[in-house]
């Protein structure tokens, strides 16, 4: 067995760069209000001929109870009015949140003898009109829900509006309802366009302005026909409070940008921010990407018990301004190579909102340029970081090393004031910070001036967790960094003997001055991994620690298939009737990394789609040795027997096992790495 050399060669460092954590960029410092981006002469939003009813000229913002309560008893008058109170008290109303919306289960199962709808007397003892009056008294608006079918979606089956469209719409208007979500359950096979047109006409006949939210789950491609009918239409099935669900919905919604505009929006479903199933980093990504997609922002968590972090995310006015931009463009995907996404949204003032989104399970450097995001040629640009709330100048490069599942959201403008801001400086770490406990590892950091102006008196500092030794092995400072130049520093890092394997935060800090003397301090955390060398001879990968893992649904399972949600919910790994006692069960899109330490020779497996999904599912398997694809299958379907896959991983520090969706979406993509071994 060979050990990880304490200072990997330059070439191997470069190869590792694509494989695992790199570093993090941050722009820090001076603050300029977002309003500075809006010239006084900004044109008024163009009236859009397709807007159905003149409403929702920017994406609707508000609250809906469904994601936090479903039909549970806590969905009631007290909750709804409590949310309205919080909108006012906590500044959310001022931030733009307006609609307080009731979802399914507000009604009783039977209509009255006159065919009227009635509120559930336990949940809403004073009736819907009283709730509407309360919400209106706060300067807010009320939304309601029913289905374009005979019954709603809840198993209790409350009355739907099919055949009652005009009287139900009249009743909603009489109650003072301002927004209708119109669902798709129990639709009796009646053509969707016909059903949603009838309700459009019924709402129009009331004479009351009512935002019309079409909810047929994207089944009939509403982005092709619903702009004439409704103000927003769901593009997918229901979201749930998980990374996999949010990501898959985002990927369905992103390509539909051409259909969105003032008064008619793609709706990738309501927000899960604050419901507890994702990390705050993931929730910031959710909120950033919904805003870049000009999606409705309907809060789906119970704000009465929400954390400060949840409020901070939901009330970030600079991010909300991206969503609510009057030009009404949905952001466009510029690139998505290897899970490194660049999505840019044209803004009314000519600036661009730019999301650098990292889908993968490890930090990634994501880069683009002012020209690529559509900005005109200029000598310099201002770059506003919408989560850090800092403003910098750039000569044109936009680049950040984004944490796993994170998003750096920038607003970039070619305005004449760029030189008032300090230069943007990118903080990055070169190579893979893999550390064996008790041994000294070497890593290199880079502080690069992306700005048009020089960064002066630049210094870099690196700190580790308590007990770690971090020593500079080359210069940590320089008098001046001109545009595009970097301060590279080599560091010797030692984790104390006995440190448990896993990820640990190191912090890189740069200090510099702008040409006008402004002092800037910019810090980013990045992860170092304490690793254990693979055992002599190697073994089953399901018995070795994983460096990182990401999976379409649920966790990567050891020695069973993937059951889509909780750990341990799978079945025996089975492909084409062949059962494997050892291996990994994953769900596309998946990536799992292992430390090989340059000491291993090959990885072998029998791979295929697990039998548990019947005839469904198609995937492709890949084995990567550092940054090189060492082996891959073509697209494999459920009908195919297990395929042998074998890769030469000689010299690799990191082995990465990838499963893609085979090009047709991740539905039913249960992928098995049967009999998966690495020889070392
Ligand atoms: C459907 C909708 C959800 C929610 C429920 C209520 O599933 O898509 O958003 O309204 O019905 O039963």
Image (tube, helix red, strand yellow):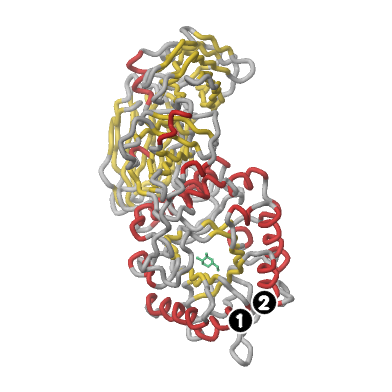
Relative depth, front residue between 277 and 57 = 57
Q: Secondary structure at mark 1?
A: helix
x and y percentages locating residue 461 in the rendered image: 54, 16
Horizontally, residue 260 falls left or right of residue 123, namely: left
Residue displayed at 53% across by 26% down: 524
Residue occupying the far front of the picture = 41
Residue 302: x %, y % from top left: 66, 56
Q: Position of residue 217 (x, y in %)?
A: 43, 65
Mark 2 secondary-structure assignment: helix
Decide: few, some or many residues near mark 1? Use Cα within 10 Å; few <14, some 14-19, many ≥20: few
- The residue that mark 2 highlights is 129
Lower sequence index among marks 1 and 2? 2
In this view, 396 is above or below 530: below
Horizontal arrangement in the rendering, residue 373 relative to residue 462 (left or right): left
Name which quarter of the figure residue 379 lies in.
top left
Q: Is residue 139 above or below residue 163?
A: above
Q: Nearer the viewer, residue 624 or 291?
A: 291
Q: Tell me if residue 93 can be seen.
A: yes
Q: State yes or no: Cβ of the residue under disc 2 lies below 8 Å from any atom of ligand 1.
A: no
Vertical placement of residue 247 versus 162, above or below: above
Residue farthest to the left, as pictured: 634
Give yes or no for contact between labels 1 and 2 (Cβ–Cβ under 8 Å): yes
Mark 1 vs mark 2, CA separation in Å: 8 Å
The residue tagged 1 is: 174
What residue is drawn where x is 70% and y is 52%? 305
Q: How crowded is the residue under tag 2: few (<14 C-alpha within 10 Å), some, or many (20+)? A: some
Vertical arrangement, residue 580 with respect to residue 594, above or below: below
């Amino acid at each position: 067995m060979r050990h990880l050399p304490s200072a990997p060669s330059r070439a191997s460092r470069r190869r590792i760069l694509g494989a695992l954590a790199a570093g993090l960029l941050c722009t820090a410092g001076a603050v300029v209000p977002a309003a500075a981006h809006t010239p006084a002469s900004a044109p008024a939003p163009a009236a859009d001929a397709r807007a159905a009813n003149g409403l929702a000229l920017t994406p609707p913002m508000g609250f809906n109870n469904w994601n936090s309560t479903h039909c549970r008893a806590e969905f009631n008058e007290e909750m709804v009015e409590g949310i309205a109170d919080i909108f006012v008290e906590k500044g959310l109303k001022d931030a733009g949140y307006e609609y307080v919306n009731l979802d399914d289960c507000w009604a009783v199962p039977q209509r009255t003898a006159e065919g009227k709808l009635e509120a559930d007397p336990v949940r809403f003892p004073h009736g819907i009109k009283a709730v509407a009056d309360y919400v209106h008294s706060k300067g807010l608006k009320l939304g309601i829900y029913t289905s374009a079918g005979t019954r709603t979606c809840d198993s209790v089956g409350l009355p739907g509006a099919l055949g009652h469209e005009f009287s139900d719409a009249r009743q909603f208007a009489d109650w003072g309802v301002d927004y209708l979500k119109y669902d798709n359950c129990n639709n009796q096979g009646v053509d969707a366009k016909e059903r949603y047109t009838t309700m459009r006409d019924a709402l129009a006949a009331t004479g009351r302005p009512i935002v019309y939210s079409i909810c047929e789950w994207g089944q009939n491609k509403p982005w092709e026909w619903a702009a004439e009918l409704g103000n927003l239409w769901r593009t997918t099935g229901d979201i749930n409070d998980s990374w996999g669900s949010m990501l898959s919905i985002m990927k369905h919604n992103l390509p539909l940008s051409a259909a969105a505009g003032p008064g008619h929006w793609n709706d990738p479903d309501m927000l899960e921010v604050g419901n507890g199933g994702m990390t705050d980093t993931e929730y910031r990504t959710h909120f950033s990407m919904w805003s870049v997609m000009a999606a409705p922002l309907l809060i789906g968590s119970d704000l009465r018990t929400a954390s400060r972090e949840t409020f901070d995310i939901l009330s970030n006015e600079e991010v909300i301004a991206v969503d609510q931009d009057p030009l009404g463009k949905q952001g466009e995907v510029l690139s998505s190579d290897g899970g490194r996404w660049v999505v840019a949204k044209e803004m009314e003032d000519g600036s661009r909102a730019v999301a650098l989104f990292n889908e993968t399970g490890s930090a990634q450097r994501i880069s683009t340029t002012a020209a690529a995001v559509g900005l005109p040629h200029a000598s310099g640009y201002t770059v506003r970081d919408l989560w850090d709330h800092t403003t910098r100048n750039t000569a044109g490069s936009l680049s950040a090393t984004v944490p796993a599942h994170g998003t750096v959201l920038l607003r970039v403008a070619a305005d004449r004031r760029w030189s008032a801001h300090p230069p943007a400086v990118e903080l990055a770490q070169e190579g893979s910070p893999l550390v064996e406990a008790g041994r000294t590892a070497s890593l290199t950091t880079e502080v690069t001036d992306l700005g048009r102006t020089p960064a002066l008196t630049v210094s870099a500092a690196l700190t580790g967790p308590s007990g770690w030794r971090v020593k500079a092995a080359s210069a940590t400072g320089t008098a001046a960094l001109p545009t595009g130049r970097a301060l590279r520093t080599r560091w010797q890092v030692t984790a104390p003997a006995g440190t448990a394997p896993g990820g640990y935060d190191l912090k890189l800090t740069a200090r510099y001055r702008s040409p006008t003397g402004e002092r800037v301090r910019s810090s980013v955390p990045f992860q170092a991994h304490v690793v254990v060398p693979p055992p002599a001879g190697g073994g089953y990968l399901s018995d070795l620690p994983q460096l990182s893992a990401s999976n379409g649904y649920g966790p990567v399972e050891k020695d069973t298939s993937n059951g889509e949600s909780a750990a341990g919910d799978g079945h025996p790994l089975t492909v084409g009737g062949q059962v494997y006692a050892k291996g990994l069960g994953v769900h596309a899109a998946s990536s799992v990394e292992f430390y090989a330490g340059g000491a291993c020779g090959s990885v072998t497996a029998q791979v295929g789609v697990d039998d548990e999904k019947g005839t469904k599912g198609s995937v492709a398997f890949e084995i990567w040795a550092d940054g090189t694809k060492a082996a891959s299958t073509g697209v494999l379907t459920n009908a195919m027997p297990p395929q042998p896959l074998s890769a030469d991983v000689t010299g690799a520090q990191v082995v990465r096992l990838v499963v893609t969706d085979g090009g047709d979406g991740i539905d039913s993509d249960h992928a098995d790495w049967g009999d998966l071994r690495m020889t070392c």
